């Protein structure tokens, strides 16, 4: 017998006691079919789906070097997975170094269409101001950030990101400003962090 109405409510699995007591995995969701006013009992439907990966902070665990290239390279660790339809403040620090004053560094960001990015940086070392800039375009390189030989630079990241309707990844990019055999290195301990802006 078909019920006169069917109101379905989904709730996140990990917070629901039925899921916890039945040992369901974190990729499942619970859907209740409300059949009040009929001869049917309420039903519990378990729907499995791909998990959404959301990473709101990340620390670089090992140095990463590039040589002889001015092409922007995706950092192997500095990326943030962000939830859809949310706004975030972004902050972090990138430590960069080279054994030579020749290659220097440029930085950038990769993010999908539907993301609005307003990310700036302020750079310096133990003796010099090295520049500042606002970056708003995906896969666009910054101006040259000079690196003195064997003198780590500190690149302070700050700004905001607005995510569209899809889960999105914000990835840090870097390159040499001048192609050189001496490496340009992003150092361990660099980090990125996102915090949701509550409207």
Image: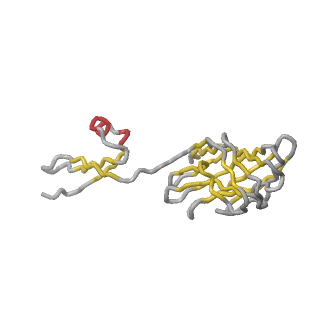
- Residue in the picture at 66% in, 40% down: 189
Residue 176 image position (x, y, % from top left)? 74, 58
Residue 140 image position (x, y, % from top left)? 69, 63
- Residue in the picture at 56% in, 44% down: 56
- Residue in the picture at 74% in, 52% down: 183
**Above or below: residue 162 compared with residue 22:** below
**Above or below: residue 118 compared with residue 58:** below
Query: Total marks drawn?
Result: 0
Taking the view exactly as shown, the residue that stands out farthest to the right is 127
188 and 108: which is toward the camera:
188
77 and 28: which is toward the camera:
77
The way the protein has been coloured in the rendering is: secondary structure
Relative side of 112 to 44, left or right = right
187 and 181: which is toward the camera:
181
Split into 4 quadrants, where in the image is the N terminus? bottom left
Residue 144 image position (x, y, % from top left)? 79, 58
Residue 199 image position (x, y, % from top left)? 57, 48
158 and 184: which is toward the camera:
184
Q: Quadrant of residue 17?
A: top left
């Amino acid at each position: 017998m078909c019920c006169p109405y069917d109101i379905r409510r989904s709730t996140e699995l990990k917070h629901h006691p039925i899921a916890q007591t039945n040992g369901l995995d974190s990729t499942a969701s619970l859907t209740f079919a409300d059949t009040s006013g009929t001869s049917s009992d309420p039903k519990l439907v378990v729907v499995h789906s791909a998990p959404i990966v959301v990473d709101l902070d990340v620390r670089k665990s090992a140095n990463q070097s590039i040589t002889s290239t001015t092409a922007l390279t995706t950092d192997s660790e500095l990326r943030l997975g962000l939830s859809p339809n949310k706004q975030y403040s972004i902050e972090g620090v990138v430590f960069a170094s080279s054994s030579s004053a020749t290659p220097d560094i440029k930085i950038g960001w990769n993010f999908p269409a539907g993301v609005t990015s307003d990310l700036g940086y302020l750079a310096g070392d133990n003796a010099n101001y090295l520049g500042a800039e606002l970056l708003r375009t995906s896969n666009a390189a910054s101006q040259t950030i000079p690196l003195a030989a064997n003198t780590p630079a500190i690149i302070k990241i700050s700004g905001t990101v607005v995510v569209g309707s899809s889960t999105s990844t914000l990835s840090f990019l870097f390159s040499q400003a001048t192609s050189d055999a001496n490496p340009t290195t992003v150092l361990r301990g660099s980090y990125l962090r996102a915090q949701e802006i509550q409207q």
